[in-house]
Amino acid sequence: MAMQFRTVIDIKPFDRKIDHSSRILSLGSCFADNIARRMQRAKFRVEASPTGILFNPESIARAVERFAAAESPAREELRHDGERYFGYDFHSAFADADPERALAAMREAARRGADALRRADTVIITFGTAWIYRLRENGDVVANCHKQPQSLFARELLAADRIADRYAKLLEGPLADKHVIFTVSPVRHLGDGAERNSLSKAVLRVAVGELASRFPDADYFPSFEIMNDELRDYRFYADDMAHPSQTAVDYIWERFGATALAESARRAAERAERIAEAAEHRPFDPRGEAHRNFCRAMLRRIDELRREQPQMQFDDEKEYFNSFLEIN
């Protein structure tokens, strides 16, 4: 009998599968963004975190409610730190020295989110932490503290049953009839301290377990368990010892594909990723006939794949390969 030196997580494939006709909305932590970028690279139709990265379940729920109501940010949501205008429900990337530009960017993000939720048949939600920050002035939970003084906020740990109840209402409301894939981010929130990070992840895992058991259209993908059991070695972490390395993200993406993607979609995704890699290649001799022939071959592959999967879009790649054929 062969010896085994690691635990391999046994994951039951989802009953509802994603293919290239699916419309996907991904919300949550930076790990959700990593997976969404891989899906976009594989030419799935994904809208990722329209309002920016969201770490806690309460802020993600607030974003879903905003999108469902097609609620546009009000001018009263703008805050000013002396240099830039920002909104506590939005990532700092939306902040701007000009209030009109900041508000316009936030409203466009909310519009994209509302459109994505309305169209989506699949919603991927990644919880990062159960710790939340409330504004002392009104009790509102903030998605981003925007480096404001800590004295403005009260820190609190959400309870698992409260998270489950909150999302049960969403699964019976704006998320009804959608396939909702929950994950718990494997990113270690070391700023909370190791013990508080473990407590937070346990709370999230209990809440998601409750939701997946109660709702047939809710599934759990164990990215957290894969990172902590299959890949339990610091070589699978980035230099900050908190985020998964690119190797780890690639492996988790591979396991996600085997769990959530239709077989035909997996094969098409692999072909699409090879085309994307070819478009990132920088030729030694861009004017050479060998490279021009390579570009023609890539364009033929794109045409073949699009005949099979007409939803796939390769505009950037086609422009790149065609640019070499136009060189005199």
Image: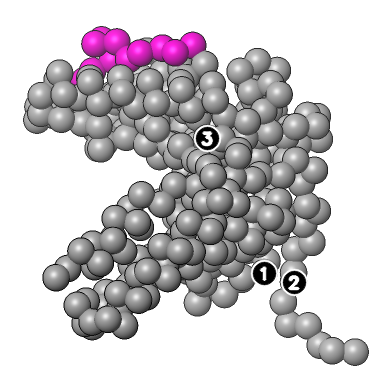
| Amino acid type, label 1 | Glu
Residue at numbered disc 3: 25
Front one among 267 and 80 = 267
Relative placement, left or right, of 174 versus 139 is right
- In the rendered structure, which disc, 2 or 1, sits on the residue that comes first in sequence? 2
Please report the bounds of the magenta region as a residue range.
69-80
| Amino acid type, label 2 | Thr
Residue at point 74%, 71% (across, down)? 7
Residue at numbered disc 2: 7
> Residue 290 — which label?
none
Relative placement, left or right, of 126 versus 29 is right
Callout 2: SS: loop
216 relative to 41, above or below:
above
- In the rendered structure, which disc, 3 or 2, sits on the residue that comes first in sequence? 2
Residue 78 magenta-highlighted:
yes
Residue at numbered disc 1: 230
Residue at the limit of the structure toward the front, as seen here: 328
Report how far apart the C-alphas of labels 3 and 2 lie in the structure: 31 Å
**Residue 215: which quarter of the image?**
top right
Relative placement, left or right, of 189 versus 85 is right
73 relative to 188, above or below:
above
Q: Quadrant of the N terminus?
A: bottom right
Q: Are marks 3 and 1 in contact (CB under 8 Å)?
A: no
Q: Are marks 2 and 1 in contact (CB under 8 Å)?
A: yes
Residue at point 72%, 34% (across, down)? 218
